[in-house]
Amino acid sequence: MGNPKAFITIPRKEAGYRPVEERTGDFEEVELTLNQEERKVQASRCMDCGIPFCHWACPLGNRMPEWQDMIYKGKWKEGVEILHETNNFPDFTGRVCPAPCEKSCVLALHEAPVTIRENEASVTEVAFLEGMIKAIPPRHRTGKRVAVVGSGPAGLAIAQQLNRKGHTVTVFEKDRSPGGLLRYGIPNFKLDKKVIDRRLNQLVEEGVLFRTNTEIGKDVSGEELMRNYDAVCLAVGAGKPRDITPVGRDLKGIYFAMDFLSQQNQLVMGEPMSHSERISARGKHVLVIGGGDTGSDCVGTSIRQGAVKVTQIEIMPKPPVGKNPATPWPHSYPNVLKTSSSHEEGCERRWLLNTLEFRGENGNVKEAVVEEISWQKADNGRLTMVGTGNIEVIKADIVFLALGFVHPVHEGLLDELGLEYDVRGNVAVDKESRSSVAKVFATGDAVMGASLVVKAIASGRKVAESVHRMLVEATV
C-alpha cells in the first residue's frame, strides 16, 4: 500500500452526472469521469483491510486491493492486466454493475466505500486510450470447433476464453448485431454501444467468428450444429418477460419494457425496428410498473422522448435510506433505497401498489386502477399480500411492464437440441455446466434465470473451463 491512511484523510468522491437539463436532451452516457490524478487519489482509499470482502462479494473474484494499488501508483497497464485476469470486460461492468464489491467494502460501514466501480471503468478507459488493450490471438489452433449460441456477456466471455485456448469459436446471434441485452436492453445513456463495438473488434482480431441474423432451429438446425461442432454452448439469456393479467390487459398502449428499450436502442443505432409499431412516450402520461433497473431505464428513456409525466410503481415496500438492519453487512446485499440518474431527472415513485385494472377509450389505455397493499408474514414464514381497500386511479396513456423475466429460452430451441429443462425453462445442467445432451453446455441466464452482467461473465468463464477440459480429454 502506498498510502495506508488515505481512507481516513480522503473522502469518497464520485464523478457524478451531467446536468439534468443537458443529458435529458440526448442519449449519450450520463456519467461524468474524474481526471487521472483524482482517480488515483480515490484508488488510494483502498485500505488493505486484510480480509477483502470486496473480493469475496464479486461474482468474478476481482482482486480489488491489487488493482486499486496499481491505479494509485499510476501503473494503469498493470492495473488493467490484473483486472483482465478475472474479468473479460471491466468496461462493461464498470458502467452497469450494481457493485456488490462496494456494498461489502469495509468502508461501507461508514457509507463511504471505495469507488470501485468507477475506478474499474476509469482504468479500462485509460488502457484503451493509451493503446494498452490489444488483441491476444492464440499461438496455435487445436482443430476443435465450438459453437456459442448467444452473444451477450456470457456468450462473449465463453468465446474469448475458448478462442484464446486455441479452439475455433463461432458465435451465433439471432439479432442484427452482437451484444445481447448489453446492446438491445441497456440504454445508451448507461452504456454507449461504441464500448461494446471496440470489444467486438478485439474478439474479431483474436479470431472469434460471428454469425448474426442467425437463429438456431430456423436458419441453422440443431442437427447441423451438433454435426459440425465439437462442443455447443448455450448462452441465450432470459428472453421471456413476466406478465400480469389485470382486467384490460389487452388494451393498446401496454408494452413490455424490453420492447420499448430495444426499439429505442435500435433507433439510436440506426437499425431497422424489430417491433412493428413505433412505441413513443412523447406527450404522454407514462406508467412504469416495476421498481427495478429495467423500470428505471424506462423512466429515463420516457423522459428523453418527451413524456408529460412519468410514474413508477412497485408492489414491494419502500426500502429504507442508508442502512437496513434486515440486510446486514457484509453478508447480505443491502436492500436500501436506490435512486438512479433517471429518477433524478423527474419521476414520481410509489410503493406498495398492486395493479387491479386497466381502463381505456377506443381500445387505448387511459388509466390504471391500483390498490394499496400490505405484506403480512404467515405461520410458515412466507409473506402474503393483503389488500387494504384503498383504491386509486392513475392516469396512464402508455404503460411499461418491467417485471423481470421467466423462461430464459424458448422451449422450441431446447426441444430442437433435445435438452431437458425445469418448470421455469432453465436449462438443466450438472456441476460442470453440461446439459442432458453430450457436448452441449449452458451458461448465464439460460441456467440461473435473469441476473447480473457480472454473474453472466463469471458463468461464461466457468463454462469455458469445462468445455476446454472436455475438448482436451477428447484428444488424449
Image (tube, rainbow, N blue to C red):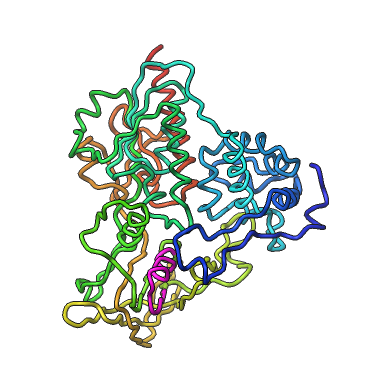
Q: Quadrant of the C terminus?
A: top left
Pinpoint residue 121: horizontal percent, then vertical percent.
58, 48
The answer to whether residue 290 shows anywhere in this view is no
Front residue of 203/413: it is 203
Residue 179 lies in quadrant: top left
The answer to whether residue 367 shows anywhere in this view is yes
Residue 124 lies in quadrant: top right
Pinpoint residue 75: horizontal percent, then vertical percent.
71, 37
Q: Is residue 118 left or right of residue 167?
A: right
The residue lying at 45 percent from left, 15 percent from top is 140
Magenta span has 307?
Answer: yes
Q: Is residue 121 left or right of residue 204?
A: right
- Residue 117 in the image: above or below residue 248: above
Front residue of 153/193: it is 193
Pinpoint residue 247: horizontal percent, then vertical percent.
22, 77
Q: Quadrant of the N terminus?
A: top right
- Give the total of numbered labels: 0
Magenta span has 319?
Answer: no
Q: Which range of residues does the magenta coloring cover?
A: 297-312
- Residue 325 in the image: above or below residue 53: below
The residue lying at 35 percent from left, 45 percent from top is 446
- Residue 187 in the image: above or below residue 356: above
Q: Is residue 115 left or right of residue 198?
A: right
Pinpoint residue 214: horizontal percent, then vertical percent.
24, 38
